[in-house]
Image: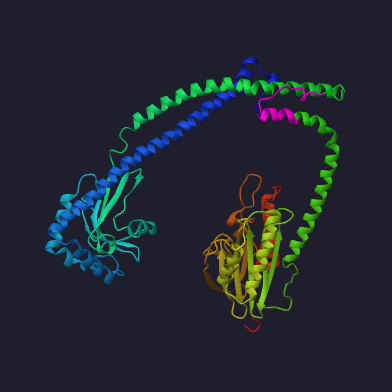
Amino acid sequence: MGKKIKKSIREMSKREKRKNSLNAKVFNAAAVHSIILGFICFLIGLGMYMNASMQDAMKEAYDKAHENLDIVKQEVDPGKFSKRTLEIYKEHRSSKMDDTYYAYFDEINNDKDYQRMIEILCDTRTEDMSDYFLAVADQKNGKLIIVADTDPRPGHLYPVGKQQSVPGWFQKYFFSRGNGSFPRTYYFLFSRGVICVSGAFIEEGNPEAGFVFVVVRATDALDGVGKFILQYVIAILFAIIVMGYIMTKRMNKSLVEPINSIADAAKAYVADKREGKIDVKHFSNLNIRPGDELENLGLIMADMEEDLTLHEENLTRITAEKERIGTELSLASRIQSNMLPGTFPAFPERKDFDIYATMDPAKEVGGDFYDFFLTDEDHLCIVMADVSGKGVPAALFMMASKIIIANNAMAGKSPAQILSDTNKLICSNNRENMFVTVWLGILEISTGKLTVANAGHEFPVFSKGGAGYELCKDKHGLVVGLMDMAQYVEYETIMKPGDKLFLYTDGIPEAKNAEGDMFGLDRLVDSLNKYPDVSAEQTIKNMKLSVDEFVKESEQFDDLTMLCLEYKGRNDM
């Protein structure tokens, strides 16, 4: 069946017109906004209610930890066992946590004071505690080492010396706040409900001296929520009725009636134009004076009558301006194209490598760019980059980035240092907050050593030893231009004679066909492996053909940029 055509207002019945009237829409808008406002107020109220309950539960965990630690201290010194546990752990932390490892802690397990401490901790454990243990922190290596655990569940009791890795945020929040006292926090788990966390340091502010860690289930935190929700639902329904009635009455006078007057004037204007009448004032005679946008609309419609005679002149001027802009964009496209290496073979005197690249912008000018140049007789610098955005701004940013990268590379710097210095210079004057992803490699031609740094760019594809092309998921650094303190790492790989490197921008894998499917990395690698032994130039042409066959008639939404390097090695190798 065909798509149902929506009726125009002239085809509607009176009932349908009332249903689609502005009054009805105003009432519906009032209802929707009342629901949204009520929901927001509900969330705020619920958050305040929950936070108050959580504060009480966190204080309870904090108080229990300190009270229980004081009880332990009355009979034994827990700090002695924390200190000894940390000493043994530091001696054997590289060992596998097996029976041999845990045997190193037997002296602690066999200590009568330690056994008494375990007994006291178990006696002071309450039913609402989900976790309750004594531990010591190795802040340098980000680990907690269990000193004494009280978990009553079979198989969940951690032995002394058990190592637990903890994330950085945990260490920062619980151990590096600098205020001396143990912090408090809470969170929600679907499997366990609301969890409140706190504890007590054996020595205030010193996690390496040991601490008691307490996790309490706040079982009463959700009590009363049902009644709270019911009250809010009633309030929202009442607000919908009241606000809908008031707004409908008000909008009818201030909005609907003036709009109908403007509609009648427009109808009369069209009728007079059809009859050939001129110099008839329609909108100027409207008496709409509410002092708001409707009055402004009436005045604009009056001006429209006077301005229509200038339409043809303005249209001619706009057409000429578009032609001028088109000419300038064409010139910008040629300038950008001339900025990129475009003469092939690029180094006809060199027989130890072959390189080929293309850039096909989605618009007149693009943000992608590639570059390759010899920094000396034995080093070839290769760049593949993608600037954020498209059009003229991206093209200008692209040319500036290309020049800065090339200047740094010609100074003999390493790939990581080139990206770092380029990033600092761009960030120093980047008010538009643009950025560029960059893959940069320097090939030592005599040895085949390729040193690479990647600033958030696509993964390269290598063909080595005749085994076909494979995606190299190298480590990404931060894109260039985002943060001036960004640091970049580099890695090395060896290319042997016959090995190839394929670089590209995201326009290749993200190219879409009419069904919205993307070309993808798998198709990219498969396309390369169909003809793995062809030249660098033919590799690029084959990839372009594969993309064109995939997208067919679909519009190109992103720049398509590719580069292929074939390393041939020295003639005497």
Residue occupying the point 66% across, 81% down = 377
Residue occupying the point 61% across, 55% down = 509
Q: Relative to 236, does residue 54 appear above or below in the rendering?
A: below
Residue occupying the point 61% across, 68% down = 501
Which residue is farthest bottom? 572
Q: Relative to 489, does residue 40 appear above or below in the rendering?
A: above
The chosen color scheme is rainbow
Q: Is residue 56 magenta?
A: no
The answer to whether residue 238 shows anywhere in this view is: yes
Question: What percent of the width, then of the height, locates residue 138?
Answer: 31, 65
Question: What percent of the width, then of the height, locates residue 441?
Answer: 60, 70
In the depicted view, which residue is nearer to us: 401 or 184? 184
Q: Relative to 240, does residue 450 appear above or below in the rendering?
A: below
Question: What percent of the width, then of the height, locates residue 190?
Answer: 35, 43
Helix, strand or loop for the magenta stretch, by majority: loop
Q: Quadrant of the C terminus?
A: bottom right
Question: What percent of the width, then of the height, locates residue 558?
Answer: 66, 53
Q: Is residue 107 left or right of residue 265?
A: left
Q: Quadrant of the N terminus?
A: top right
Residue occupying the point 39% across, 59% down = 168
Quarter of the image for residue 461 reads: bottom right
Which residue is farthest top? 14
Q: Which residues are magenta?
A: 281-300
The answer to whether residue 21 shows anywhere in this view is: no
